[in-house]
Amino acid sequence: MTVFLIILIAYLIGSIPFGLLGKFFFKIEDPRTFGSKNIGATNVLRSGNKKAAAFTLFFDMFKGFIAVFISSFIDNDLVYLAILSVVFGHIFPIYLLFKGGKGVATFLGALASYSAFVGSLTLLAWIAVFYFTRKSSVAGISAIVLSNLFLFVFCDNTSVKFSLLLLSIFILFKHSENIKRLLNKEEFSFQGRDKN
């Protein structure tokens, strides 16, 4: 029962489509109708509304954070289930017929909730890579990969490390089109039309 409760709560929290809610709060076009048709912050920014993009980024991270935080009070030994469930909730939201984002922001929020130190290192990695490349896809991919290195060094919980490794592989798979464009040197910078 505890396992089911943690999975359900985290999944439903992860499914909240903050990128779409920005359509109502900030009067922007539905992000599913332009750009990459993704509900993530990068695509929301293409609407031209920075506040909507910031709103999406913050709450996509926050839902990852709060889901893991809640689960730690229910059963701290099962926190890895909350991390998996909240990110998969974002990627496959029940409220949007299982068509969501790519999971990077929610992953970062969940990771920060589990370990503030590892989460901070991963976020700094994202910021640094984005600063030098101006490509959100490169920053996201790099942060996901490096998070596993940080976990390997600073985390003793085998269940968490293994779960996040599997989750990272899946998120990288979701970025397969971005990776193909990067290899073909077709991925545009943030100043242009980043297709992440």
Image (cartoon, grey):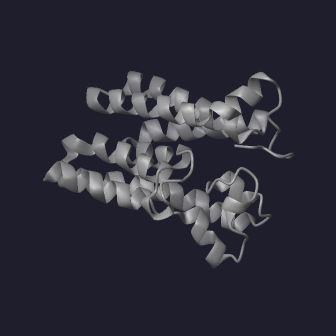
Q: Is residue 22 above or below residue 87?
A: below
Q: In this view, does 188 lie to the left or right of 88?
A: right
Q: How many marks?
A: 0
Relative to the observer, which residue lies in front, 38 or 105? 38
Q: Quadrant of residue 77?
A: top left
Q: Give the residue at the far front of this rendering.
A: 97
Residue 76 coordinates in the image, percent (x, y): 21, 45
Q: Image point 30% across, 40% down: which residue?
A: 80
Q: Image point 74% across, 64% down: which residue?
A: 50
Relative to the observer, which residue lies in front, 140 or 125? 140
Residue 57 coordinates in the image, percent (x, y): 59, 57
Residue 23 coordinates in the image, percent (x, y): 65, 72
Q: Give the residue at the far right of this rendering.
A: 192
Q: Image point 71% across, 27% down: which residue?
A: 180
Q: Image point 75% across, 38% down: which residue?
A: 135
Whether residue 73 is visible to the viewer of this picture, yes or no, is no
Relative to the observer, which residue lies in front, 46 or 54? 46
Q: Quadrant of residue 134?
A: top right
Q: Is residue 171 left or right of residue 8?
A: right
Q: Is residue 116 above or below residue 73?
A: above
Name the quadrant of the C terminus: top right
Whether residue 60 is visible to the viewer of this picture, yes or no, is yes
Q: Is residue 135 left or right of residue 16?
A: right
Residue 11 coordinates in the image, percent (x, y): 36, 55
